[in-house]
Image (cartoon, rainbow, N blue to C red):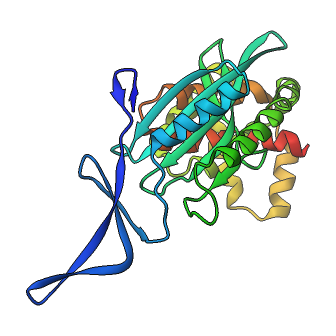
Amino acid sequence: MEFGEFKLPRAYLIPIYRKVGDSFVEISNRRAIIGENGKIYDIVSDRYELVLHETVVNTVRKILNDLNLDYEEEIKVSFDGGFMVAEYLIDTKEILGDILKLGFVVTNSYNRTSGINITGFIYRLACKNGLVVREDIFGRRFKHYSFVATADYEELKKSITAVIEEINKIPELIEFAVKETVSPLDVVHFIETEFKNVTKLKKILYRKLSNKLNVDFEYWLVVYKGLRRTKESRRREIIGKLNMPEVNLWDTINVMTELITYSRMDEKVRYDLSKRVSKLLAKVKEG
């Protein structure tokens, strides 16, 4: 399927053979997912139903058109075409002077890093940052088994409609985040937990947070690492005596999303990191 200047990649389910003597015998109950580029994405059960990226996109487009919704669409692929993320912006809100576009993202993969996954999406016009909203706030996910779900029109329509309804709850969460503050130790703990596998990005993030929030996060990282080596009772005593500043939660989220949005990385990694950042909104919901 043509999209802009590129075509959404396709993949196929191909039988697998093993050599027995001078012959090749098909391996039952197994298939290989192979891209049109020759890339072998994965080996799957013969029950697995491959869903093409273009099938997902065409179905989503038809659903939005049938719902009479105007939308902005952006599609990205990575992992040699094995992963796709499609963004759909359908509404604009002004929240305390901040202009946000709300919508959802749909993912699909040939390498089984993601099923057909539908989650909320926030796009901030001021700095053009995007934030994927985690499923623990709301979301719908399908595996590619015919007995669970495929890119079926009615199933996707039901899930997209449900996510669109939940999107209306996002402004309330953001309004709270704009007014909420968190301690630098809480932010450091979050980063050390959620960004632990992206060491280089983590170092850059601490510098950006320090510059934009006027708090020395590298200092608080040292404090955090020291506290981790102390007993809990002693740790609480030390924290109680610290003259600790507070930082705005929404500003903190935006520094993180800005870095993720504009850093060079695989789209699947970007998608996953963005979802992790939205855990901060999930904590607002819990509060």
Residue at 36 percent of width and 69 percent of height? 31
Taking the view exactly as shown, the residue that stands out farthest to the left is: 22
Q: Percent from the top left, x then y, of residue 107?
A: 55, 43
Quarter in which the N terminus is drawn: top left
Q: Percent from the top left, x then y, of residue 7?
A: 35, 31
Taking the view exactly as shown, the residue that stands out farthest to the bottom is: 21
Quarter in which the C terminus is drawn: top right
Residue at 64 percent of width and 20 percent of height? 71
Q: Nearer the viewer, residue 121 or 38?
A: 38
Relative to residue 123, is residue 184 depicted above or below? below
- Residue 265 location, quadrant: top left
- Residue 101 location, quadrant: top right
Relative to residue 88, is residue 51 depicted above or below? below
Left or right of 166? Residue 5 is left
Q: Percent from the top left, x then y, of residue 86?
A: 54, 33
Q: Nearer the viewer, residue 58 or 274?
A: 58
Residue 33 can be seen in this image: yes
Residue at 76 percent of width and 13 percent of height? 98
